[in-house]
Image: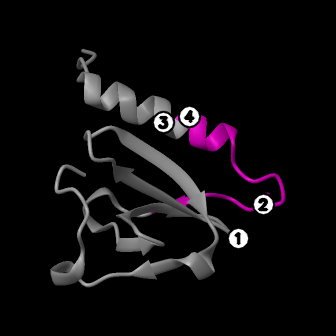
Amino acid sequence: MIKAGSAEDLDRMMARTEADRVRPMDDTSPIRDFPKYNRPLVQVGSIFGKALGWSGSYGLIERLDASEKYHLAWAQPDSIKRVAHELWKGSRGL
């Protein structure tokens, strides 16, 4: 039996497909995903999110914007900072 996904699940799947499509061309290493319930809390500039996965040269960051719209983007590892739970200011909806 196929389980119907929510609209949110579809948005996340489409965002992941788009992120994979626009992956930086200089990185051909495999993408590794963090376990769903053990994704590091991170900050990239002024944006708070969670690290969804990584490759040899980039990290894939998920976040919700002020209107709760889901986004995924690749970031260089030197711009990604891990943040302690008590200091993280991201959306709890992730």
Measured Cα–Cα span from mark 4 to mark 3 = 5 Å
Q: Which image quadrant for residue 50? A: bottom left
Which residue is the site of mark 4? 17
Whichever of labels 4 and 2 marks the residue nearer the N terminus, that label is 4
**Left or right: where 4 falls relative to 54:** left
Measured Cα–Cα span from mark 1 to mark 2 = 6 Å
User: Which of 69 and 30 lies nearest the eye of the viewer?
Assistant: 69
Which residue is the site of mark 3? 15
User: Which of 84 and 6 lies nearest the eye of the viewer?
Assistant: 84
Picture coordinates of residue 19, whole percent (x, y): 58, 43
Q: Which residues are magenta?
A: 17-33
Which residue is the site of mark 2? 27
Image marks 4 and 3: residues in contact by CB distance under 8 Å: yes
Picture coordinates of residue 5, whole percent (x, y): 26, 23
Q: Residue at 36% across / 53% down in the picture?
A: 63
Measured Cα–Cα span from mark 1 to mark 4 = 19 Å
Image marks 4 and 2: residues in contact by CB distance under 8 Å: no
Q: Indicate how the structure is coloured in the image.
A: one colour
Whichever of labels 1 and 2 marks the residue nearer the N terminus, that label is 2
Q: Within the magenta stretch, is there residue 80?
A: no
- The answer to whether residue 64 is above or below residue 46 is above
Measured Cα–Cα span from mark 1 to mark 3 = 20 Å
Which residue is the site of mark 1? 57
Q: Secondary structure at mark 3?
A: helix
User: Which of 12 and 83 lies nearest the eye of the viewer?
Assistant: 83
| Mark 3, other Cα within 10 Å: few <14 / some 14–19 / many ≥20 | some
Amino acid bearing label 2? Asp
Amino acid bearing label 1? Ser
Picture coordinates of residue 64, whole percent (x, y): 32, 48
Q: Residue at 82% across / 52% down in the picture?
A: 25
Image marks 1 and 2: residues in contact by CB distance under 8 Å: yes
